[in-house]
Amino acid sequence: MSVISRGFGGRAERPERSVPPGQYLTDEFPVLSAGPTPRIDTEDWRLDIKDLDGSGSSLSWAQLMELPNEEVTVDIHCVTRWSKHDTTWRGVSLDTLLEHSETEAGYALIRCYGDYSTNLPLEDLLDGKAWVAFEFEGGELDPEHGGPARLLVPHLYLWKSAKWINAIELRADDQPGFWESLGYHEYGDPWLEQRYVGD
Ligand SMILES: Nc1nc2c(c(=O)[nH]1)N[C@H]1C(S)=C(S)[C@@H](COP(=O)(O)O)O[C@H]1N2
Ligand SMILES: [Mo]
């Protein structure tokens, strides 16, 4: 939500906005998938939430659609160095999804349709920082970009924004996910350039 100010010449001036270190801005929306795109019918779609003690819930698409959702405009940053400003999504916040959970967990492992997972501290999913997103720029989320629904955690590198999300496993430990097991950073803050283990 940039402020557009009028210069003396009547020209619209847009103040320069920064990208994280080592990133460049793009208007494209590249597809980055480690495997084939799964096609999940919303009739069959589920989101399971599992807590430490094995208790949990399983949400259908209809139930997801009944929850309050919101539109957010955020910047996204891929570890392959592209960043994109002002992307608009609609989704259900994780605050809403985990509202009734009184978990003792410190971490979450996100599982997906297909063979992909990613880990993050639970606090990075809460307080308005993460959504299960099902619309992009006002339209249905394309399967290539994670439709019918993906996790969106824009403050971390985009590999944390798991496409085709299927489960949120609440955990006591920070169990590495797909890329994290292959040498990527366990946290992935783009502003600290946490690309690889040890960064
Ligand atoms: N399930 C799943 N989610 C995933 C991936 C994947 O391969 N599988 N790739 C990740 C990576 S590395 C990036 S950069 C983003 C890319 O999202 P996009 O394809 O919509 O640009 O999705 C992330 N989420
Ligand atoms: Mo990525």
Image (cartoon, rainbow, N blue to C red):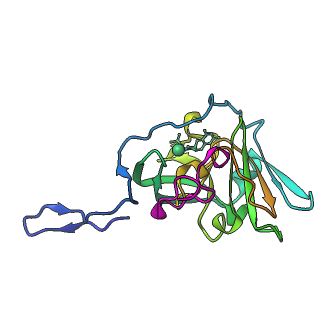
How many marks the image carries: the answer is 0
Please give the range of residues in magenta: 180-199
Between 22 and 65, the residue placed more toward the observer is 22
Q: Is residue 188 left or right of residue 117?
A: left
Q: Is residue 10 left or right of residue 163?
A: left
Is residue 80 found inside the magenta-colored segment of the image? no
Q: Is residue 188 left or right of residue 149?
A: left
Q: Quadrant of ligand 1?
A: top right
Residue 149 position within the rendered picture, expressed as x and y whole percent measured from the top left: 64, 45
Residue 3 position within the rendered picture, expressed as x and y whole percent measured from the top left: 30, 68
Between 131 and 6, the residue placed more toward the observer is 131
Is residue 183 found inside the magenta-colored segment of the image? yes
Q: Is residue 91 left or right of residue 89?
A: right
Q: Residue at x 59, y 50 (%)?
A: 184
Report which quarter residue 182 is drawn in: top right
Between 138 and 196, the residue placed more toward the observer is 196
Residue 37 position within the rendered picture, expressed as x and y whole percent measured from the top left: 62, 30
**In which quadrant of the rendered image does the N terminus lie?**
bottom left
Q: Residue at x 78, y 62 (%)?
A: 173
Residue 164 position within the rendered picture, expressed as x and y whole percent measured from the top left: 66, 41
